[in-house]
Amino acid sequence: MTGMLVTLLFILAAAQADYQQCNAKNDYLEARLSPRGAFVFCAVCNVPNSTATEHFDDFSRIHRELTLPPACVLASLESTPDHVYKFGVCDDGTGKIRTKNVEKPCISESYHFLAYLSYLEAMTCLGIDPREMFGLLNLESNFQTNIGSFSGAWGVGQLTGVAVATTNQFKRLAPYAQRKECEPLKRYFEAPMSDKNACEWIGVPENPARNFLYAGITYLTFKKLAAVEVAKALPLAKLKPAERERAIFDITAYMYNGGDGGVRQALRVFLEEKGPAPLSYSVFKAEFRDYLREYFGSSIPYYAARPDALAGKRREVSMYVGGIESRLAKVEKAAGVKCSR
Amino acid sequence: MLTLILALLQLTCALAHQSGEADLLAKVQHTKAAILTSRTQQAKLDRLAELKHYLATDAERLSERNPAAQRRLRFTVEGLRLYLDYLDPDELAAARCARVRSQLLFSADPRGIGPESLPGEAREALEILSLICPKK
């Protein structure tokens, strides 16, 4: 019943959505997606050449509960700033990413469906509520499959070589390979993604599904560490379950951006300085953010980082959760629906 | 008189703090030298285990004093403990050094910006790893 309702909502949303008209400069992804709604190379389609709405119907029959409205991903795609990020395409000749003269891709119905359905497939496979990671991925990439950063991170999860390498080396995808929910993404479990060639992280139609999978695994790896830290933290021991979840999410998000080493280091010293008295979530949230801004990366002079590099990293890490929330609020407003938990 | 006493107290604290830093650095350097001269892989891993034990004891000792006053030293000790924890003896005994290195880099700098953005404690752990891992 829920599935049917969501399907209906999706069809209505698609019918009402005012998709962008592509032009010669921004239609480069369209060549890999068939015109208007039908996938040619859809990574997540069970039925080849099915229309997007047919596929969605198929998908929602399999997964009875879809908790993320499609308007969220559309609003995120549409909110991508024009000149802040770089975009890349895989050059067929060299096999490398070309960024020169590559504009933001046009947001067609096919592209929206591909991003949305790939996201649902990957999250369903990993057992993550799609609303949980929505804000983080909205901040990282606006769900744009071929977006890049100047530090060499690519794709929807802004993956780097080291994140891909550890996922492969520690076989972190393996526990999910046999899950029924991962059946549509089976091919990605058989051949791991290269940690050297970033083309594999952005190329359509394998992506964004494959990139979402790796981003989800990276997120879960950090979440496990965050949960352990919270479980042994006396001041956080009395948080209500929902608040505890939020604290774990915040710490996980900080780790996704700054690494678990630095964040766990700061958290342990922070909690020790606070003493054993219980902390409310709101106090933890505000004070730990301020603490990160002030002390993240503090070390004795022998191990200290360059002051300018450290200041930049402190700013970036401490503002990460706030950034997720403010960008999420904008997207939810544009979408007219709730996209988070 | 009171001012003099306070100044003396401050000086004592500062000296104790500096001596804490010096002790830590000396212990790390000593371990590195010992690993370098150890003949067997097991002996190298034993030296690493000693350092981990020292850091755990040191962390406990530091947390008993006023933690905020010892913040940078505490950060450093925690950082070294966290990054050295990734030097898993089982993995190293099986010579899976590349995996260990990747895991350490991922933990310290998941954005993969490069060596310049690595925390100093992670660089130290990488250096210790290179002393333990057999040269190819």
Image (spheres, coloured by chain):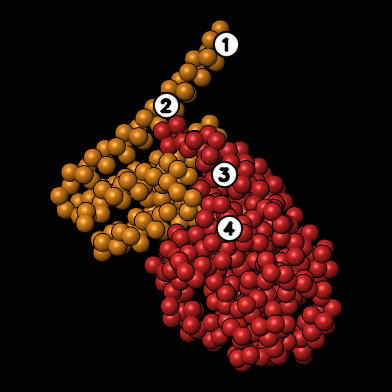
Chain colours: A red, B orange
Of marks 1 and 4, the one in the foreground = 4
Of marks 3 and 4, the one in the foreground = 4
Residue at the disc numbered 3:
A313
**Residue visible at 35% across and 34% down in the picture:** B25
- Quote the CA–CA distance across marks 1 and 3: 40 Å
Of marks 1 and 3, the one in the foreground = 3
In this picture, is A202 found above or below A14? above
SS at mark 1?
helix
Q: Are marks 2 and 3 on the same chain?
A: no
Q: Position of residue A85 (x, y in %)?
A: 64, 55
Of marks 4 and 2, the one in the foreground = 4
Residue at the disc numbered 1:
B3
SS at mark 3?
helix
Quarter of the rendering containing residue A131: bottom right
Chain ID of residue with mark 1: B
The three-letter code of the residue at mark 3 reads: Lys
Mark 4 is surrounded, within 10 Å at the Cα level, by few (under 14), some (14 to 19) or many (20 or more) other residues, namely few
Q: Position of residue A157 (x, y in %)?
A: 58, 64
**Residue visible at 43% across and 37% down in the picture:** A303
In this picture, is A190 found above or below B38? below
Residue farthest left in this picture: B39
Residue at the disc numbered 4:
A100
The three-letter code of the residue at mark 2 reads: Gln
